[in-house]
């Protein structure tokens, strides 16, 4: 049984990447594009290729259709390329010691790289050394390194806009960094009101970029509006242990997914809120639709920002019947959800909205 | 070996059916491993590896054999009648050396002409597979019309053979009567010489009669003594009771091995099982198998069946717990399987906790994520000592790597005030050395965690003072500074620095400190200097004395100005 199985789903040619005992495997599970309306699936995932990885896989992201960037507990960041013709995986580029510690004995050891995010060709990584690295896929050296960006561990990173990133750290702060600026300071810092509970994951609303969700060590889900204030808009008591990952559904952002050390995976559904209101959150909804509806008297605020989730019926479902060991990661695309646990192999749920 | 999550969590279940199901699950897992291993063996090209895998396959196969027998005899505790049927199934499942021969004959064009034809018929008869035997015989009969008569009789006998049934349609006594009757019929036909012309059929008839010699002749087809045992039972004592097994087992083994071969360890284990010596079975298995998995889980299952007497070992725990502890301890040395080990320890009532406490502290914490998982496990079990010690280890590591924020984060998790103080002292030391704060993002945003330790509070407040000063909010800054000293939040060692910080405020054009505040400051200064009369350093150090003098001067001047100011304002 694997520890820390990671899973990622990717674009239209549906592939799953899983990690088991530090072996990265790529599986093909059929074309999402051909899935029926109710998400009927075509067959079981089958293994395409795999490769051994040095160190624990802490995080990974697809760079493009053929390449995946992997963050290692040794502090190395590797790009793996999938060769379609002979179905193999190979390491095409590596930044060793992207993250490292220099301790008082002046010997530097690797520090775990905890998060990676891509926006082809840019790759941003963060780690336990509090460092932020900006790489370009085709360049050997880092484009930019923000040393000591944070005095605590950076747990996760995501893009806010093309040149701005969001990071969360282990003293409960959410920071915005503007990579165009040369100074090594965040442009904004947000933090939780009470105890500085470490934040482990962050995700941004796909359409409304001011809405950010974070998950904490105490299992709390926080929704932030970064246009206003420095504190979260809502705090939702969710899991009983660390929330490892949070994801907005990329095409249906009324839906949010969180997974935790307590072994549960929750599906947060606010779509019922907008049932009476004209729904602008269709698949591929655009910001113009939002504007035109705002003239109607109903305040069409995103369901996520409403201050009283108990009043506006948000449906929350636990998708795992038998909670046992931690759910370490999840990914969602279309009607399909993939997640990995500490106990067994990855799980695939293909009928999310059935 | 594949390892599975244990089903001990079903601890409340005492019903047999569920236990049997659990046992079957274990067996199917063993089989699955065997399959995987087999696949690996045939797909690998390295002969050494292949040899290794093949050995594994045979070990796994033996394990399943033993487990299956234990399931029949102990878990299910099959009684007379059903016992035989189960044993037949068992043999059919596990003695498969003859399978390829069977397949070969069956798939040939005219099976009855195949040279191994009669062997296959014999195999079927020996395993009690009457229908299949009859089917084959019919082919022979149709090919050989002269023996039609003999065939019909033999076929009839085989059809009529009474066997135990699983449902309650007949009692044992009924079965015995019927069987006796049938046995006599077979006897008659044999003695009449009905089969005299066909030695094959004659031997089959003898087998049907339970003739030991006839059965023993087919040694190669049975391959093992336990097959022999079951065949014997089938044809001479179909209503055998569990407790009678041991006698037959012993004699079967002796007859089969015939004194030329000595029994192998596997044979001894099976024999112990037939003798219902559970402890012996477990003991022998422990010796033979290199991995604790098998014995630990089997013992646990038997324990749940309430079959093991609580047999206190020297170390005070019972056998089940001992084995589980051994097994789980082995898991902890694996980099990812230790989490399963935790579950096992949880289910060992006597020593599980102690073992867990010892093991969990020794798990290598290579990443923070792993440390967090370990911490969560400790917190769930109220293992506070371990929580503190793990947090301290992580905090020390962070401190050594100069990750002060991380260090603080770990001390907050452990609610370790002493460590928080240590970290704050580090910050303050840095400040004194460099004249500015590092990691402002941390200190500026301490929030309520500031209250964890006095030193930490001081740090936060001191930084606030600097901020206020930077924002030119002097009165507030002044007030804060004073509070820091008078409320004894600041450590004494820092007072001098604080007073020195007060200097620029005193020298401002505008009067900032009120009279009372000035008096307070003076008092602080006097406390400071008075408190160290015999400190040589203090007197001799020029810089220090200069500082003190400057302070005294500044304070006095300020006092003068403020008295005047307050004097004029007063009264309005």
Image (cartoon, coloured by chain):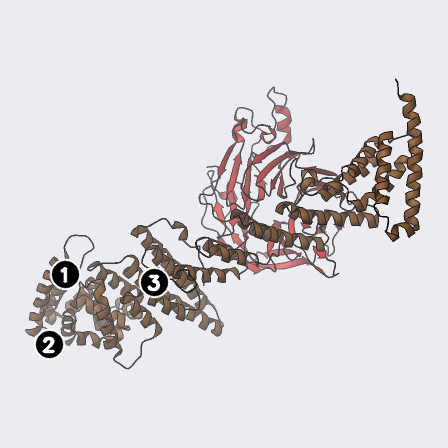
Chain colours: A red, B brown
Tag 2 residue: B197
Secondary structure state at the residue bearing disc 3? helix
Please state which of residues B536 and A337 is positioned toward the viewer in this rendering: B536
- Taking the image as drawn, is residue A132 in sight? no
Question: Of discs 3 and 1, which sits in the foreground?
Answer: 3
Q: Earlier in the sequence, mark 1 or mark 2?
A: 1
A23 is higher (above) or lower (below) than A209: below
For residue A138, what is the image quadrant?
bottom right
* Label 1 close to label 2 by CB (< 8 Å): no
The image shows residue B172 at horizontal and vertical percentages of: 14, 58
Q: Are marks 3 and 1 on the same chain?
A: yes
> Which residue lies most toward the bottom here?
B260
Tag 3 residue: B67
For residue A247, what is the image quadrant?
top right
* Label 3 close to label 2 by CB (< 8 Å): no
Q: Earlier in the sequence, mark 3 or mark 2?
A: 3
């Amino acid at each position: 049984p694997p520890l820390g199985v990671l899973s990622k789903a990717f674009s239209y040619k549906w592939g799953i990447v899983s990690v088991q005992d530090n072996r990265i495997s790529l599986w093909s599970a059929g074309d999402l594009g051909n899935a029926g309306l109710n998400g009927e699936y075509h067959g079981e995932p089958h293994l395409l290729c795999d490769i051994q990885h040095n160190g624990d896989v802490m995080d990974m992201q697809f760079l493009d259709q053929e390449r995946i960037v992997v963050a290692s507990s040794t502090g190395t960041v590797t790009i793996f390329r999938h060769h379609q013709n002979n179905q193999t995986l190979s390491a095409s580029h590596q930044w060793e010691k992207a993250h490292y510690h220099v301790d008082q004995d002046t010997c530097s050891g690797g520090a775990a790289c905890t998060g990676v995010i891509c926006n082809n060709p840019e790759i941003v990584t963060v780690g336990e050394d509090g460092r932020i690295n900006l790489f370009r896929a085709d360049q050997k050296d880092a484009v930019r390194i923000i040393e000591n960006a944070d005095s605590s561990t950076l747990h996760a990173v995501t893009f806010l806009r093309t040149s701005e990133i969001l990071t969360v750290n282990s003293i409960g702060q959410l920071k915005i960094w503007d990579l165009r600026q040369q100074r090594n300071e965040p442009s904004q810092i947000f933090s939780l009101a009470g105890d500085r509970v470490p934040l482990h994951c962050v995700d941004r609303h796909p359409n409304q970029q001011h809405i950010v969700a974070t998950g904490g060590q105490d299992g709390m889900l926080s929704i932030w509006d970064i246009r206003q204030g420095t504190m979260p808009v809502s705090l939702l008591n969710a899991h009983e242990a660390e929330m490892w990952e949070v994801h907005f559904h990329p095409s249906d952002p009324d839906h949010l997914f969180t997974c935790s050390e307590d072994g549960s995976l929750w599906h947060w559904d606010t779509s019922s809120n907008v049932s009476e209101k004209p729904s602008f959150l269709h698949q591929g909804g655009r910001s113009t639709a939002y504007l035109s509806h705002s003239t109607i008297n109903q305040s069409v605020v995103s369901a996520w920002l409403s201050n009283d989730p108990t009043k506006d019926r948000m449906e929350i479902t636990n998708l795992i019947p038998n909670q046992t060991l931690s759910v370490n990661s999840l990914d969602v695309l279309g009607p399909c959800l993939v997640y990995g646990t500490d106990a067994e192999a990855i799980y695939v749920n293909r009928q999310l909205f059935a | 070996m594949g390892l599975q999550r244990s089903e001990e969590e079903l601890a409340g279940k005492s019903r047999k059916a569920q236990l049997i199901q659990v046992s079957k699950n274990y067996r199917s897992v063993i089989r699955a491993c065997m399959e995987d291993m087999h696949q690996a063996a045939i797909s690998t090209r390295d002969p050494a590896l292949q040899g290794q895998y093949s050995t594994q396959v045979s070990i796994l196969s033996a394990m399943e054999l033993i487990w299956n027998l234990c399931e029949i005899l102990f878990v299910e505790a099959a009684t007379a009648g059903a016992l035989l049927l189960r044993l037949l199934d068992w043999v059919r499942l596990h003695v498969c050396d003859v399978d390829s021969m069977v397949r070969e004959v069956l798939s040939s064009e005219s099976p009855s002409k195949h040279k191994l034809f009669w062997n296959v018929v014999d195999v079927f008869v020996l395993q009690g597979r009457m229908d299949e035997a009859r089917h084959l015989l019919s082919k022979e009969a149709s090919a050989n019309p002269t023996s039609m008569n003999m065939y019909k009789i033999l076929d009839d006998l085989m059809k009529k053979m009474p066997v135990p049934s699983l449902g309650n349609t007949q009692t044992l006594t009924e079965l015995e009567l019927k069987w006796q009757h049938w046995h006599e019929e077979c006897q008659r036909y044999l003695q009449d010489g009905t089969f005299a012309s066909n030695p094959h059929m004659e031997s089959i008839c003898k087998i049907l009669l339970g003739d030991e010699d006839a059965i023993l002749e087919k040694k190669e087809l049975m391959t093992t003594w336990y097959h022999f045992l079951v065949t014997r039972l089938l044809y001479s004592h179909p209503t055998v009771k569990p407790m009678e097994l041991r006698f037959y087992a012993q004699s079967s083994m002796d007859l089969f091995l015939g004194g030329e071969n000595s029994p192998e360890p596997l044979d001894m284990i099976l024999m112990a099982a037939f003798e219902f010596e559970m402890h012996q079975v477990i003991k022998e298995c422990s010796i033979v198998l290199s991995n604790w998995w098998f014995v630990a889980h089997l013992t646990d299952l038997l324990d749940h069946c309430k079959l093991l007497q609580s047999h206190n070992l020297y170390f005070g725990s019972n056998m089940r717990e001992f084995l589980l502890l051994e097994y789980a301890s082995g898991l902890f040395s694996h980099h990812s399987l230790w989490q399963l080990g935790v579950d096992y320890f949880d289910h060992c009532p006597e020593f599980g906790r102690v073992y867990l406490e010892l093991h969990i502290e020794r798990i290598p914490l290579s990443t923070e994520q792993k440390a967090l998982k370990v911490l969560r496990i400790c917190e769930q079990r109220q293992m506070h000592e371990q929580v503190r010690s793990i947090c301290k280890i992580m905090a020390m590591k962070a401190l050594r790597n100069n990750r002060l924020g991380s260090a603080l984060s770990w001390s907050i998790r452990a609610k370790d005030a002493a460590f928080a103080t240590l970290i704050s002292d580090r910050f303050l030391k840095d400040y004194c050395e460099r004249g500015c704060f590092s990691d402002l993002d941390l200190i500026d945003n301490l929030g309520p965690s500031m209250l964890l330790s006095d030193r930490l509070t001081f740090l936060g407040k001191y930084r606030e003072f600097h901020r206020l000063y930077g924002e030119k909010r002097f009165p507030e800054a002044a007030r804060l500074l004073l509070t820091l000293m008078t409320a004894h939040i600041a450590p004494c060692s820092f007072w001098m620095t604080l007073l020195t910080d007060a200097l620029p405020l005193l020298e401002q054009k505008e009067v900032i400190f009120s009279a009372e505040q000035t008096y307070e400051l003076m008092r602080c200064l006097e406390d400071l200097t008075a408190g160290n009369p015999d400190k040589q350093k203090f007197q001799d150090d020029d810089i220090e004395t200069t500082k003190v003098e400057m302070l005294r001067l500044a304070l006095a001047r300020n006092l003068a100005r403020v008295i005047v100011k307050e004097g004029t304002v007063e009264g309005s």
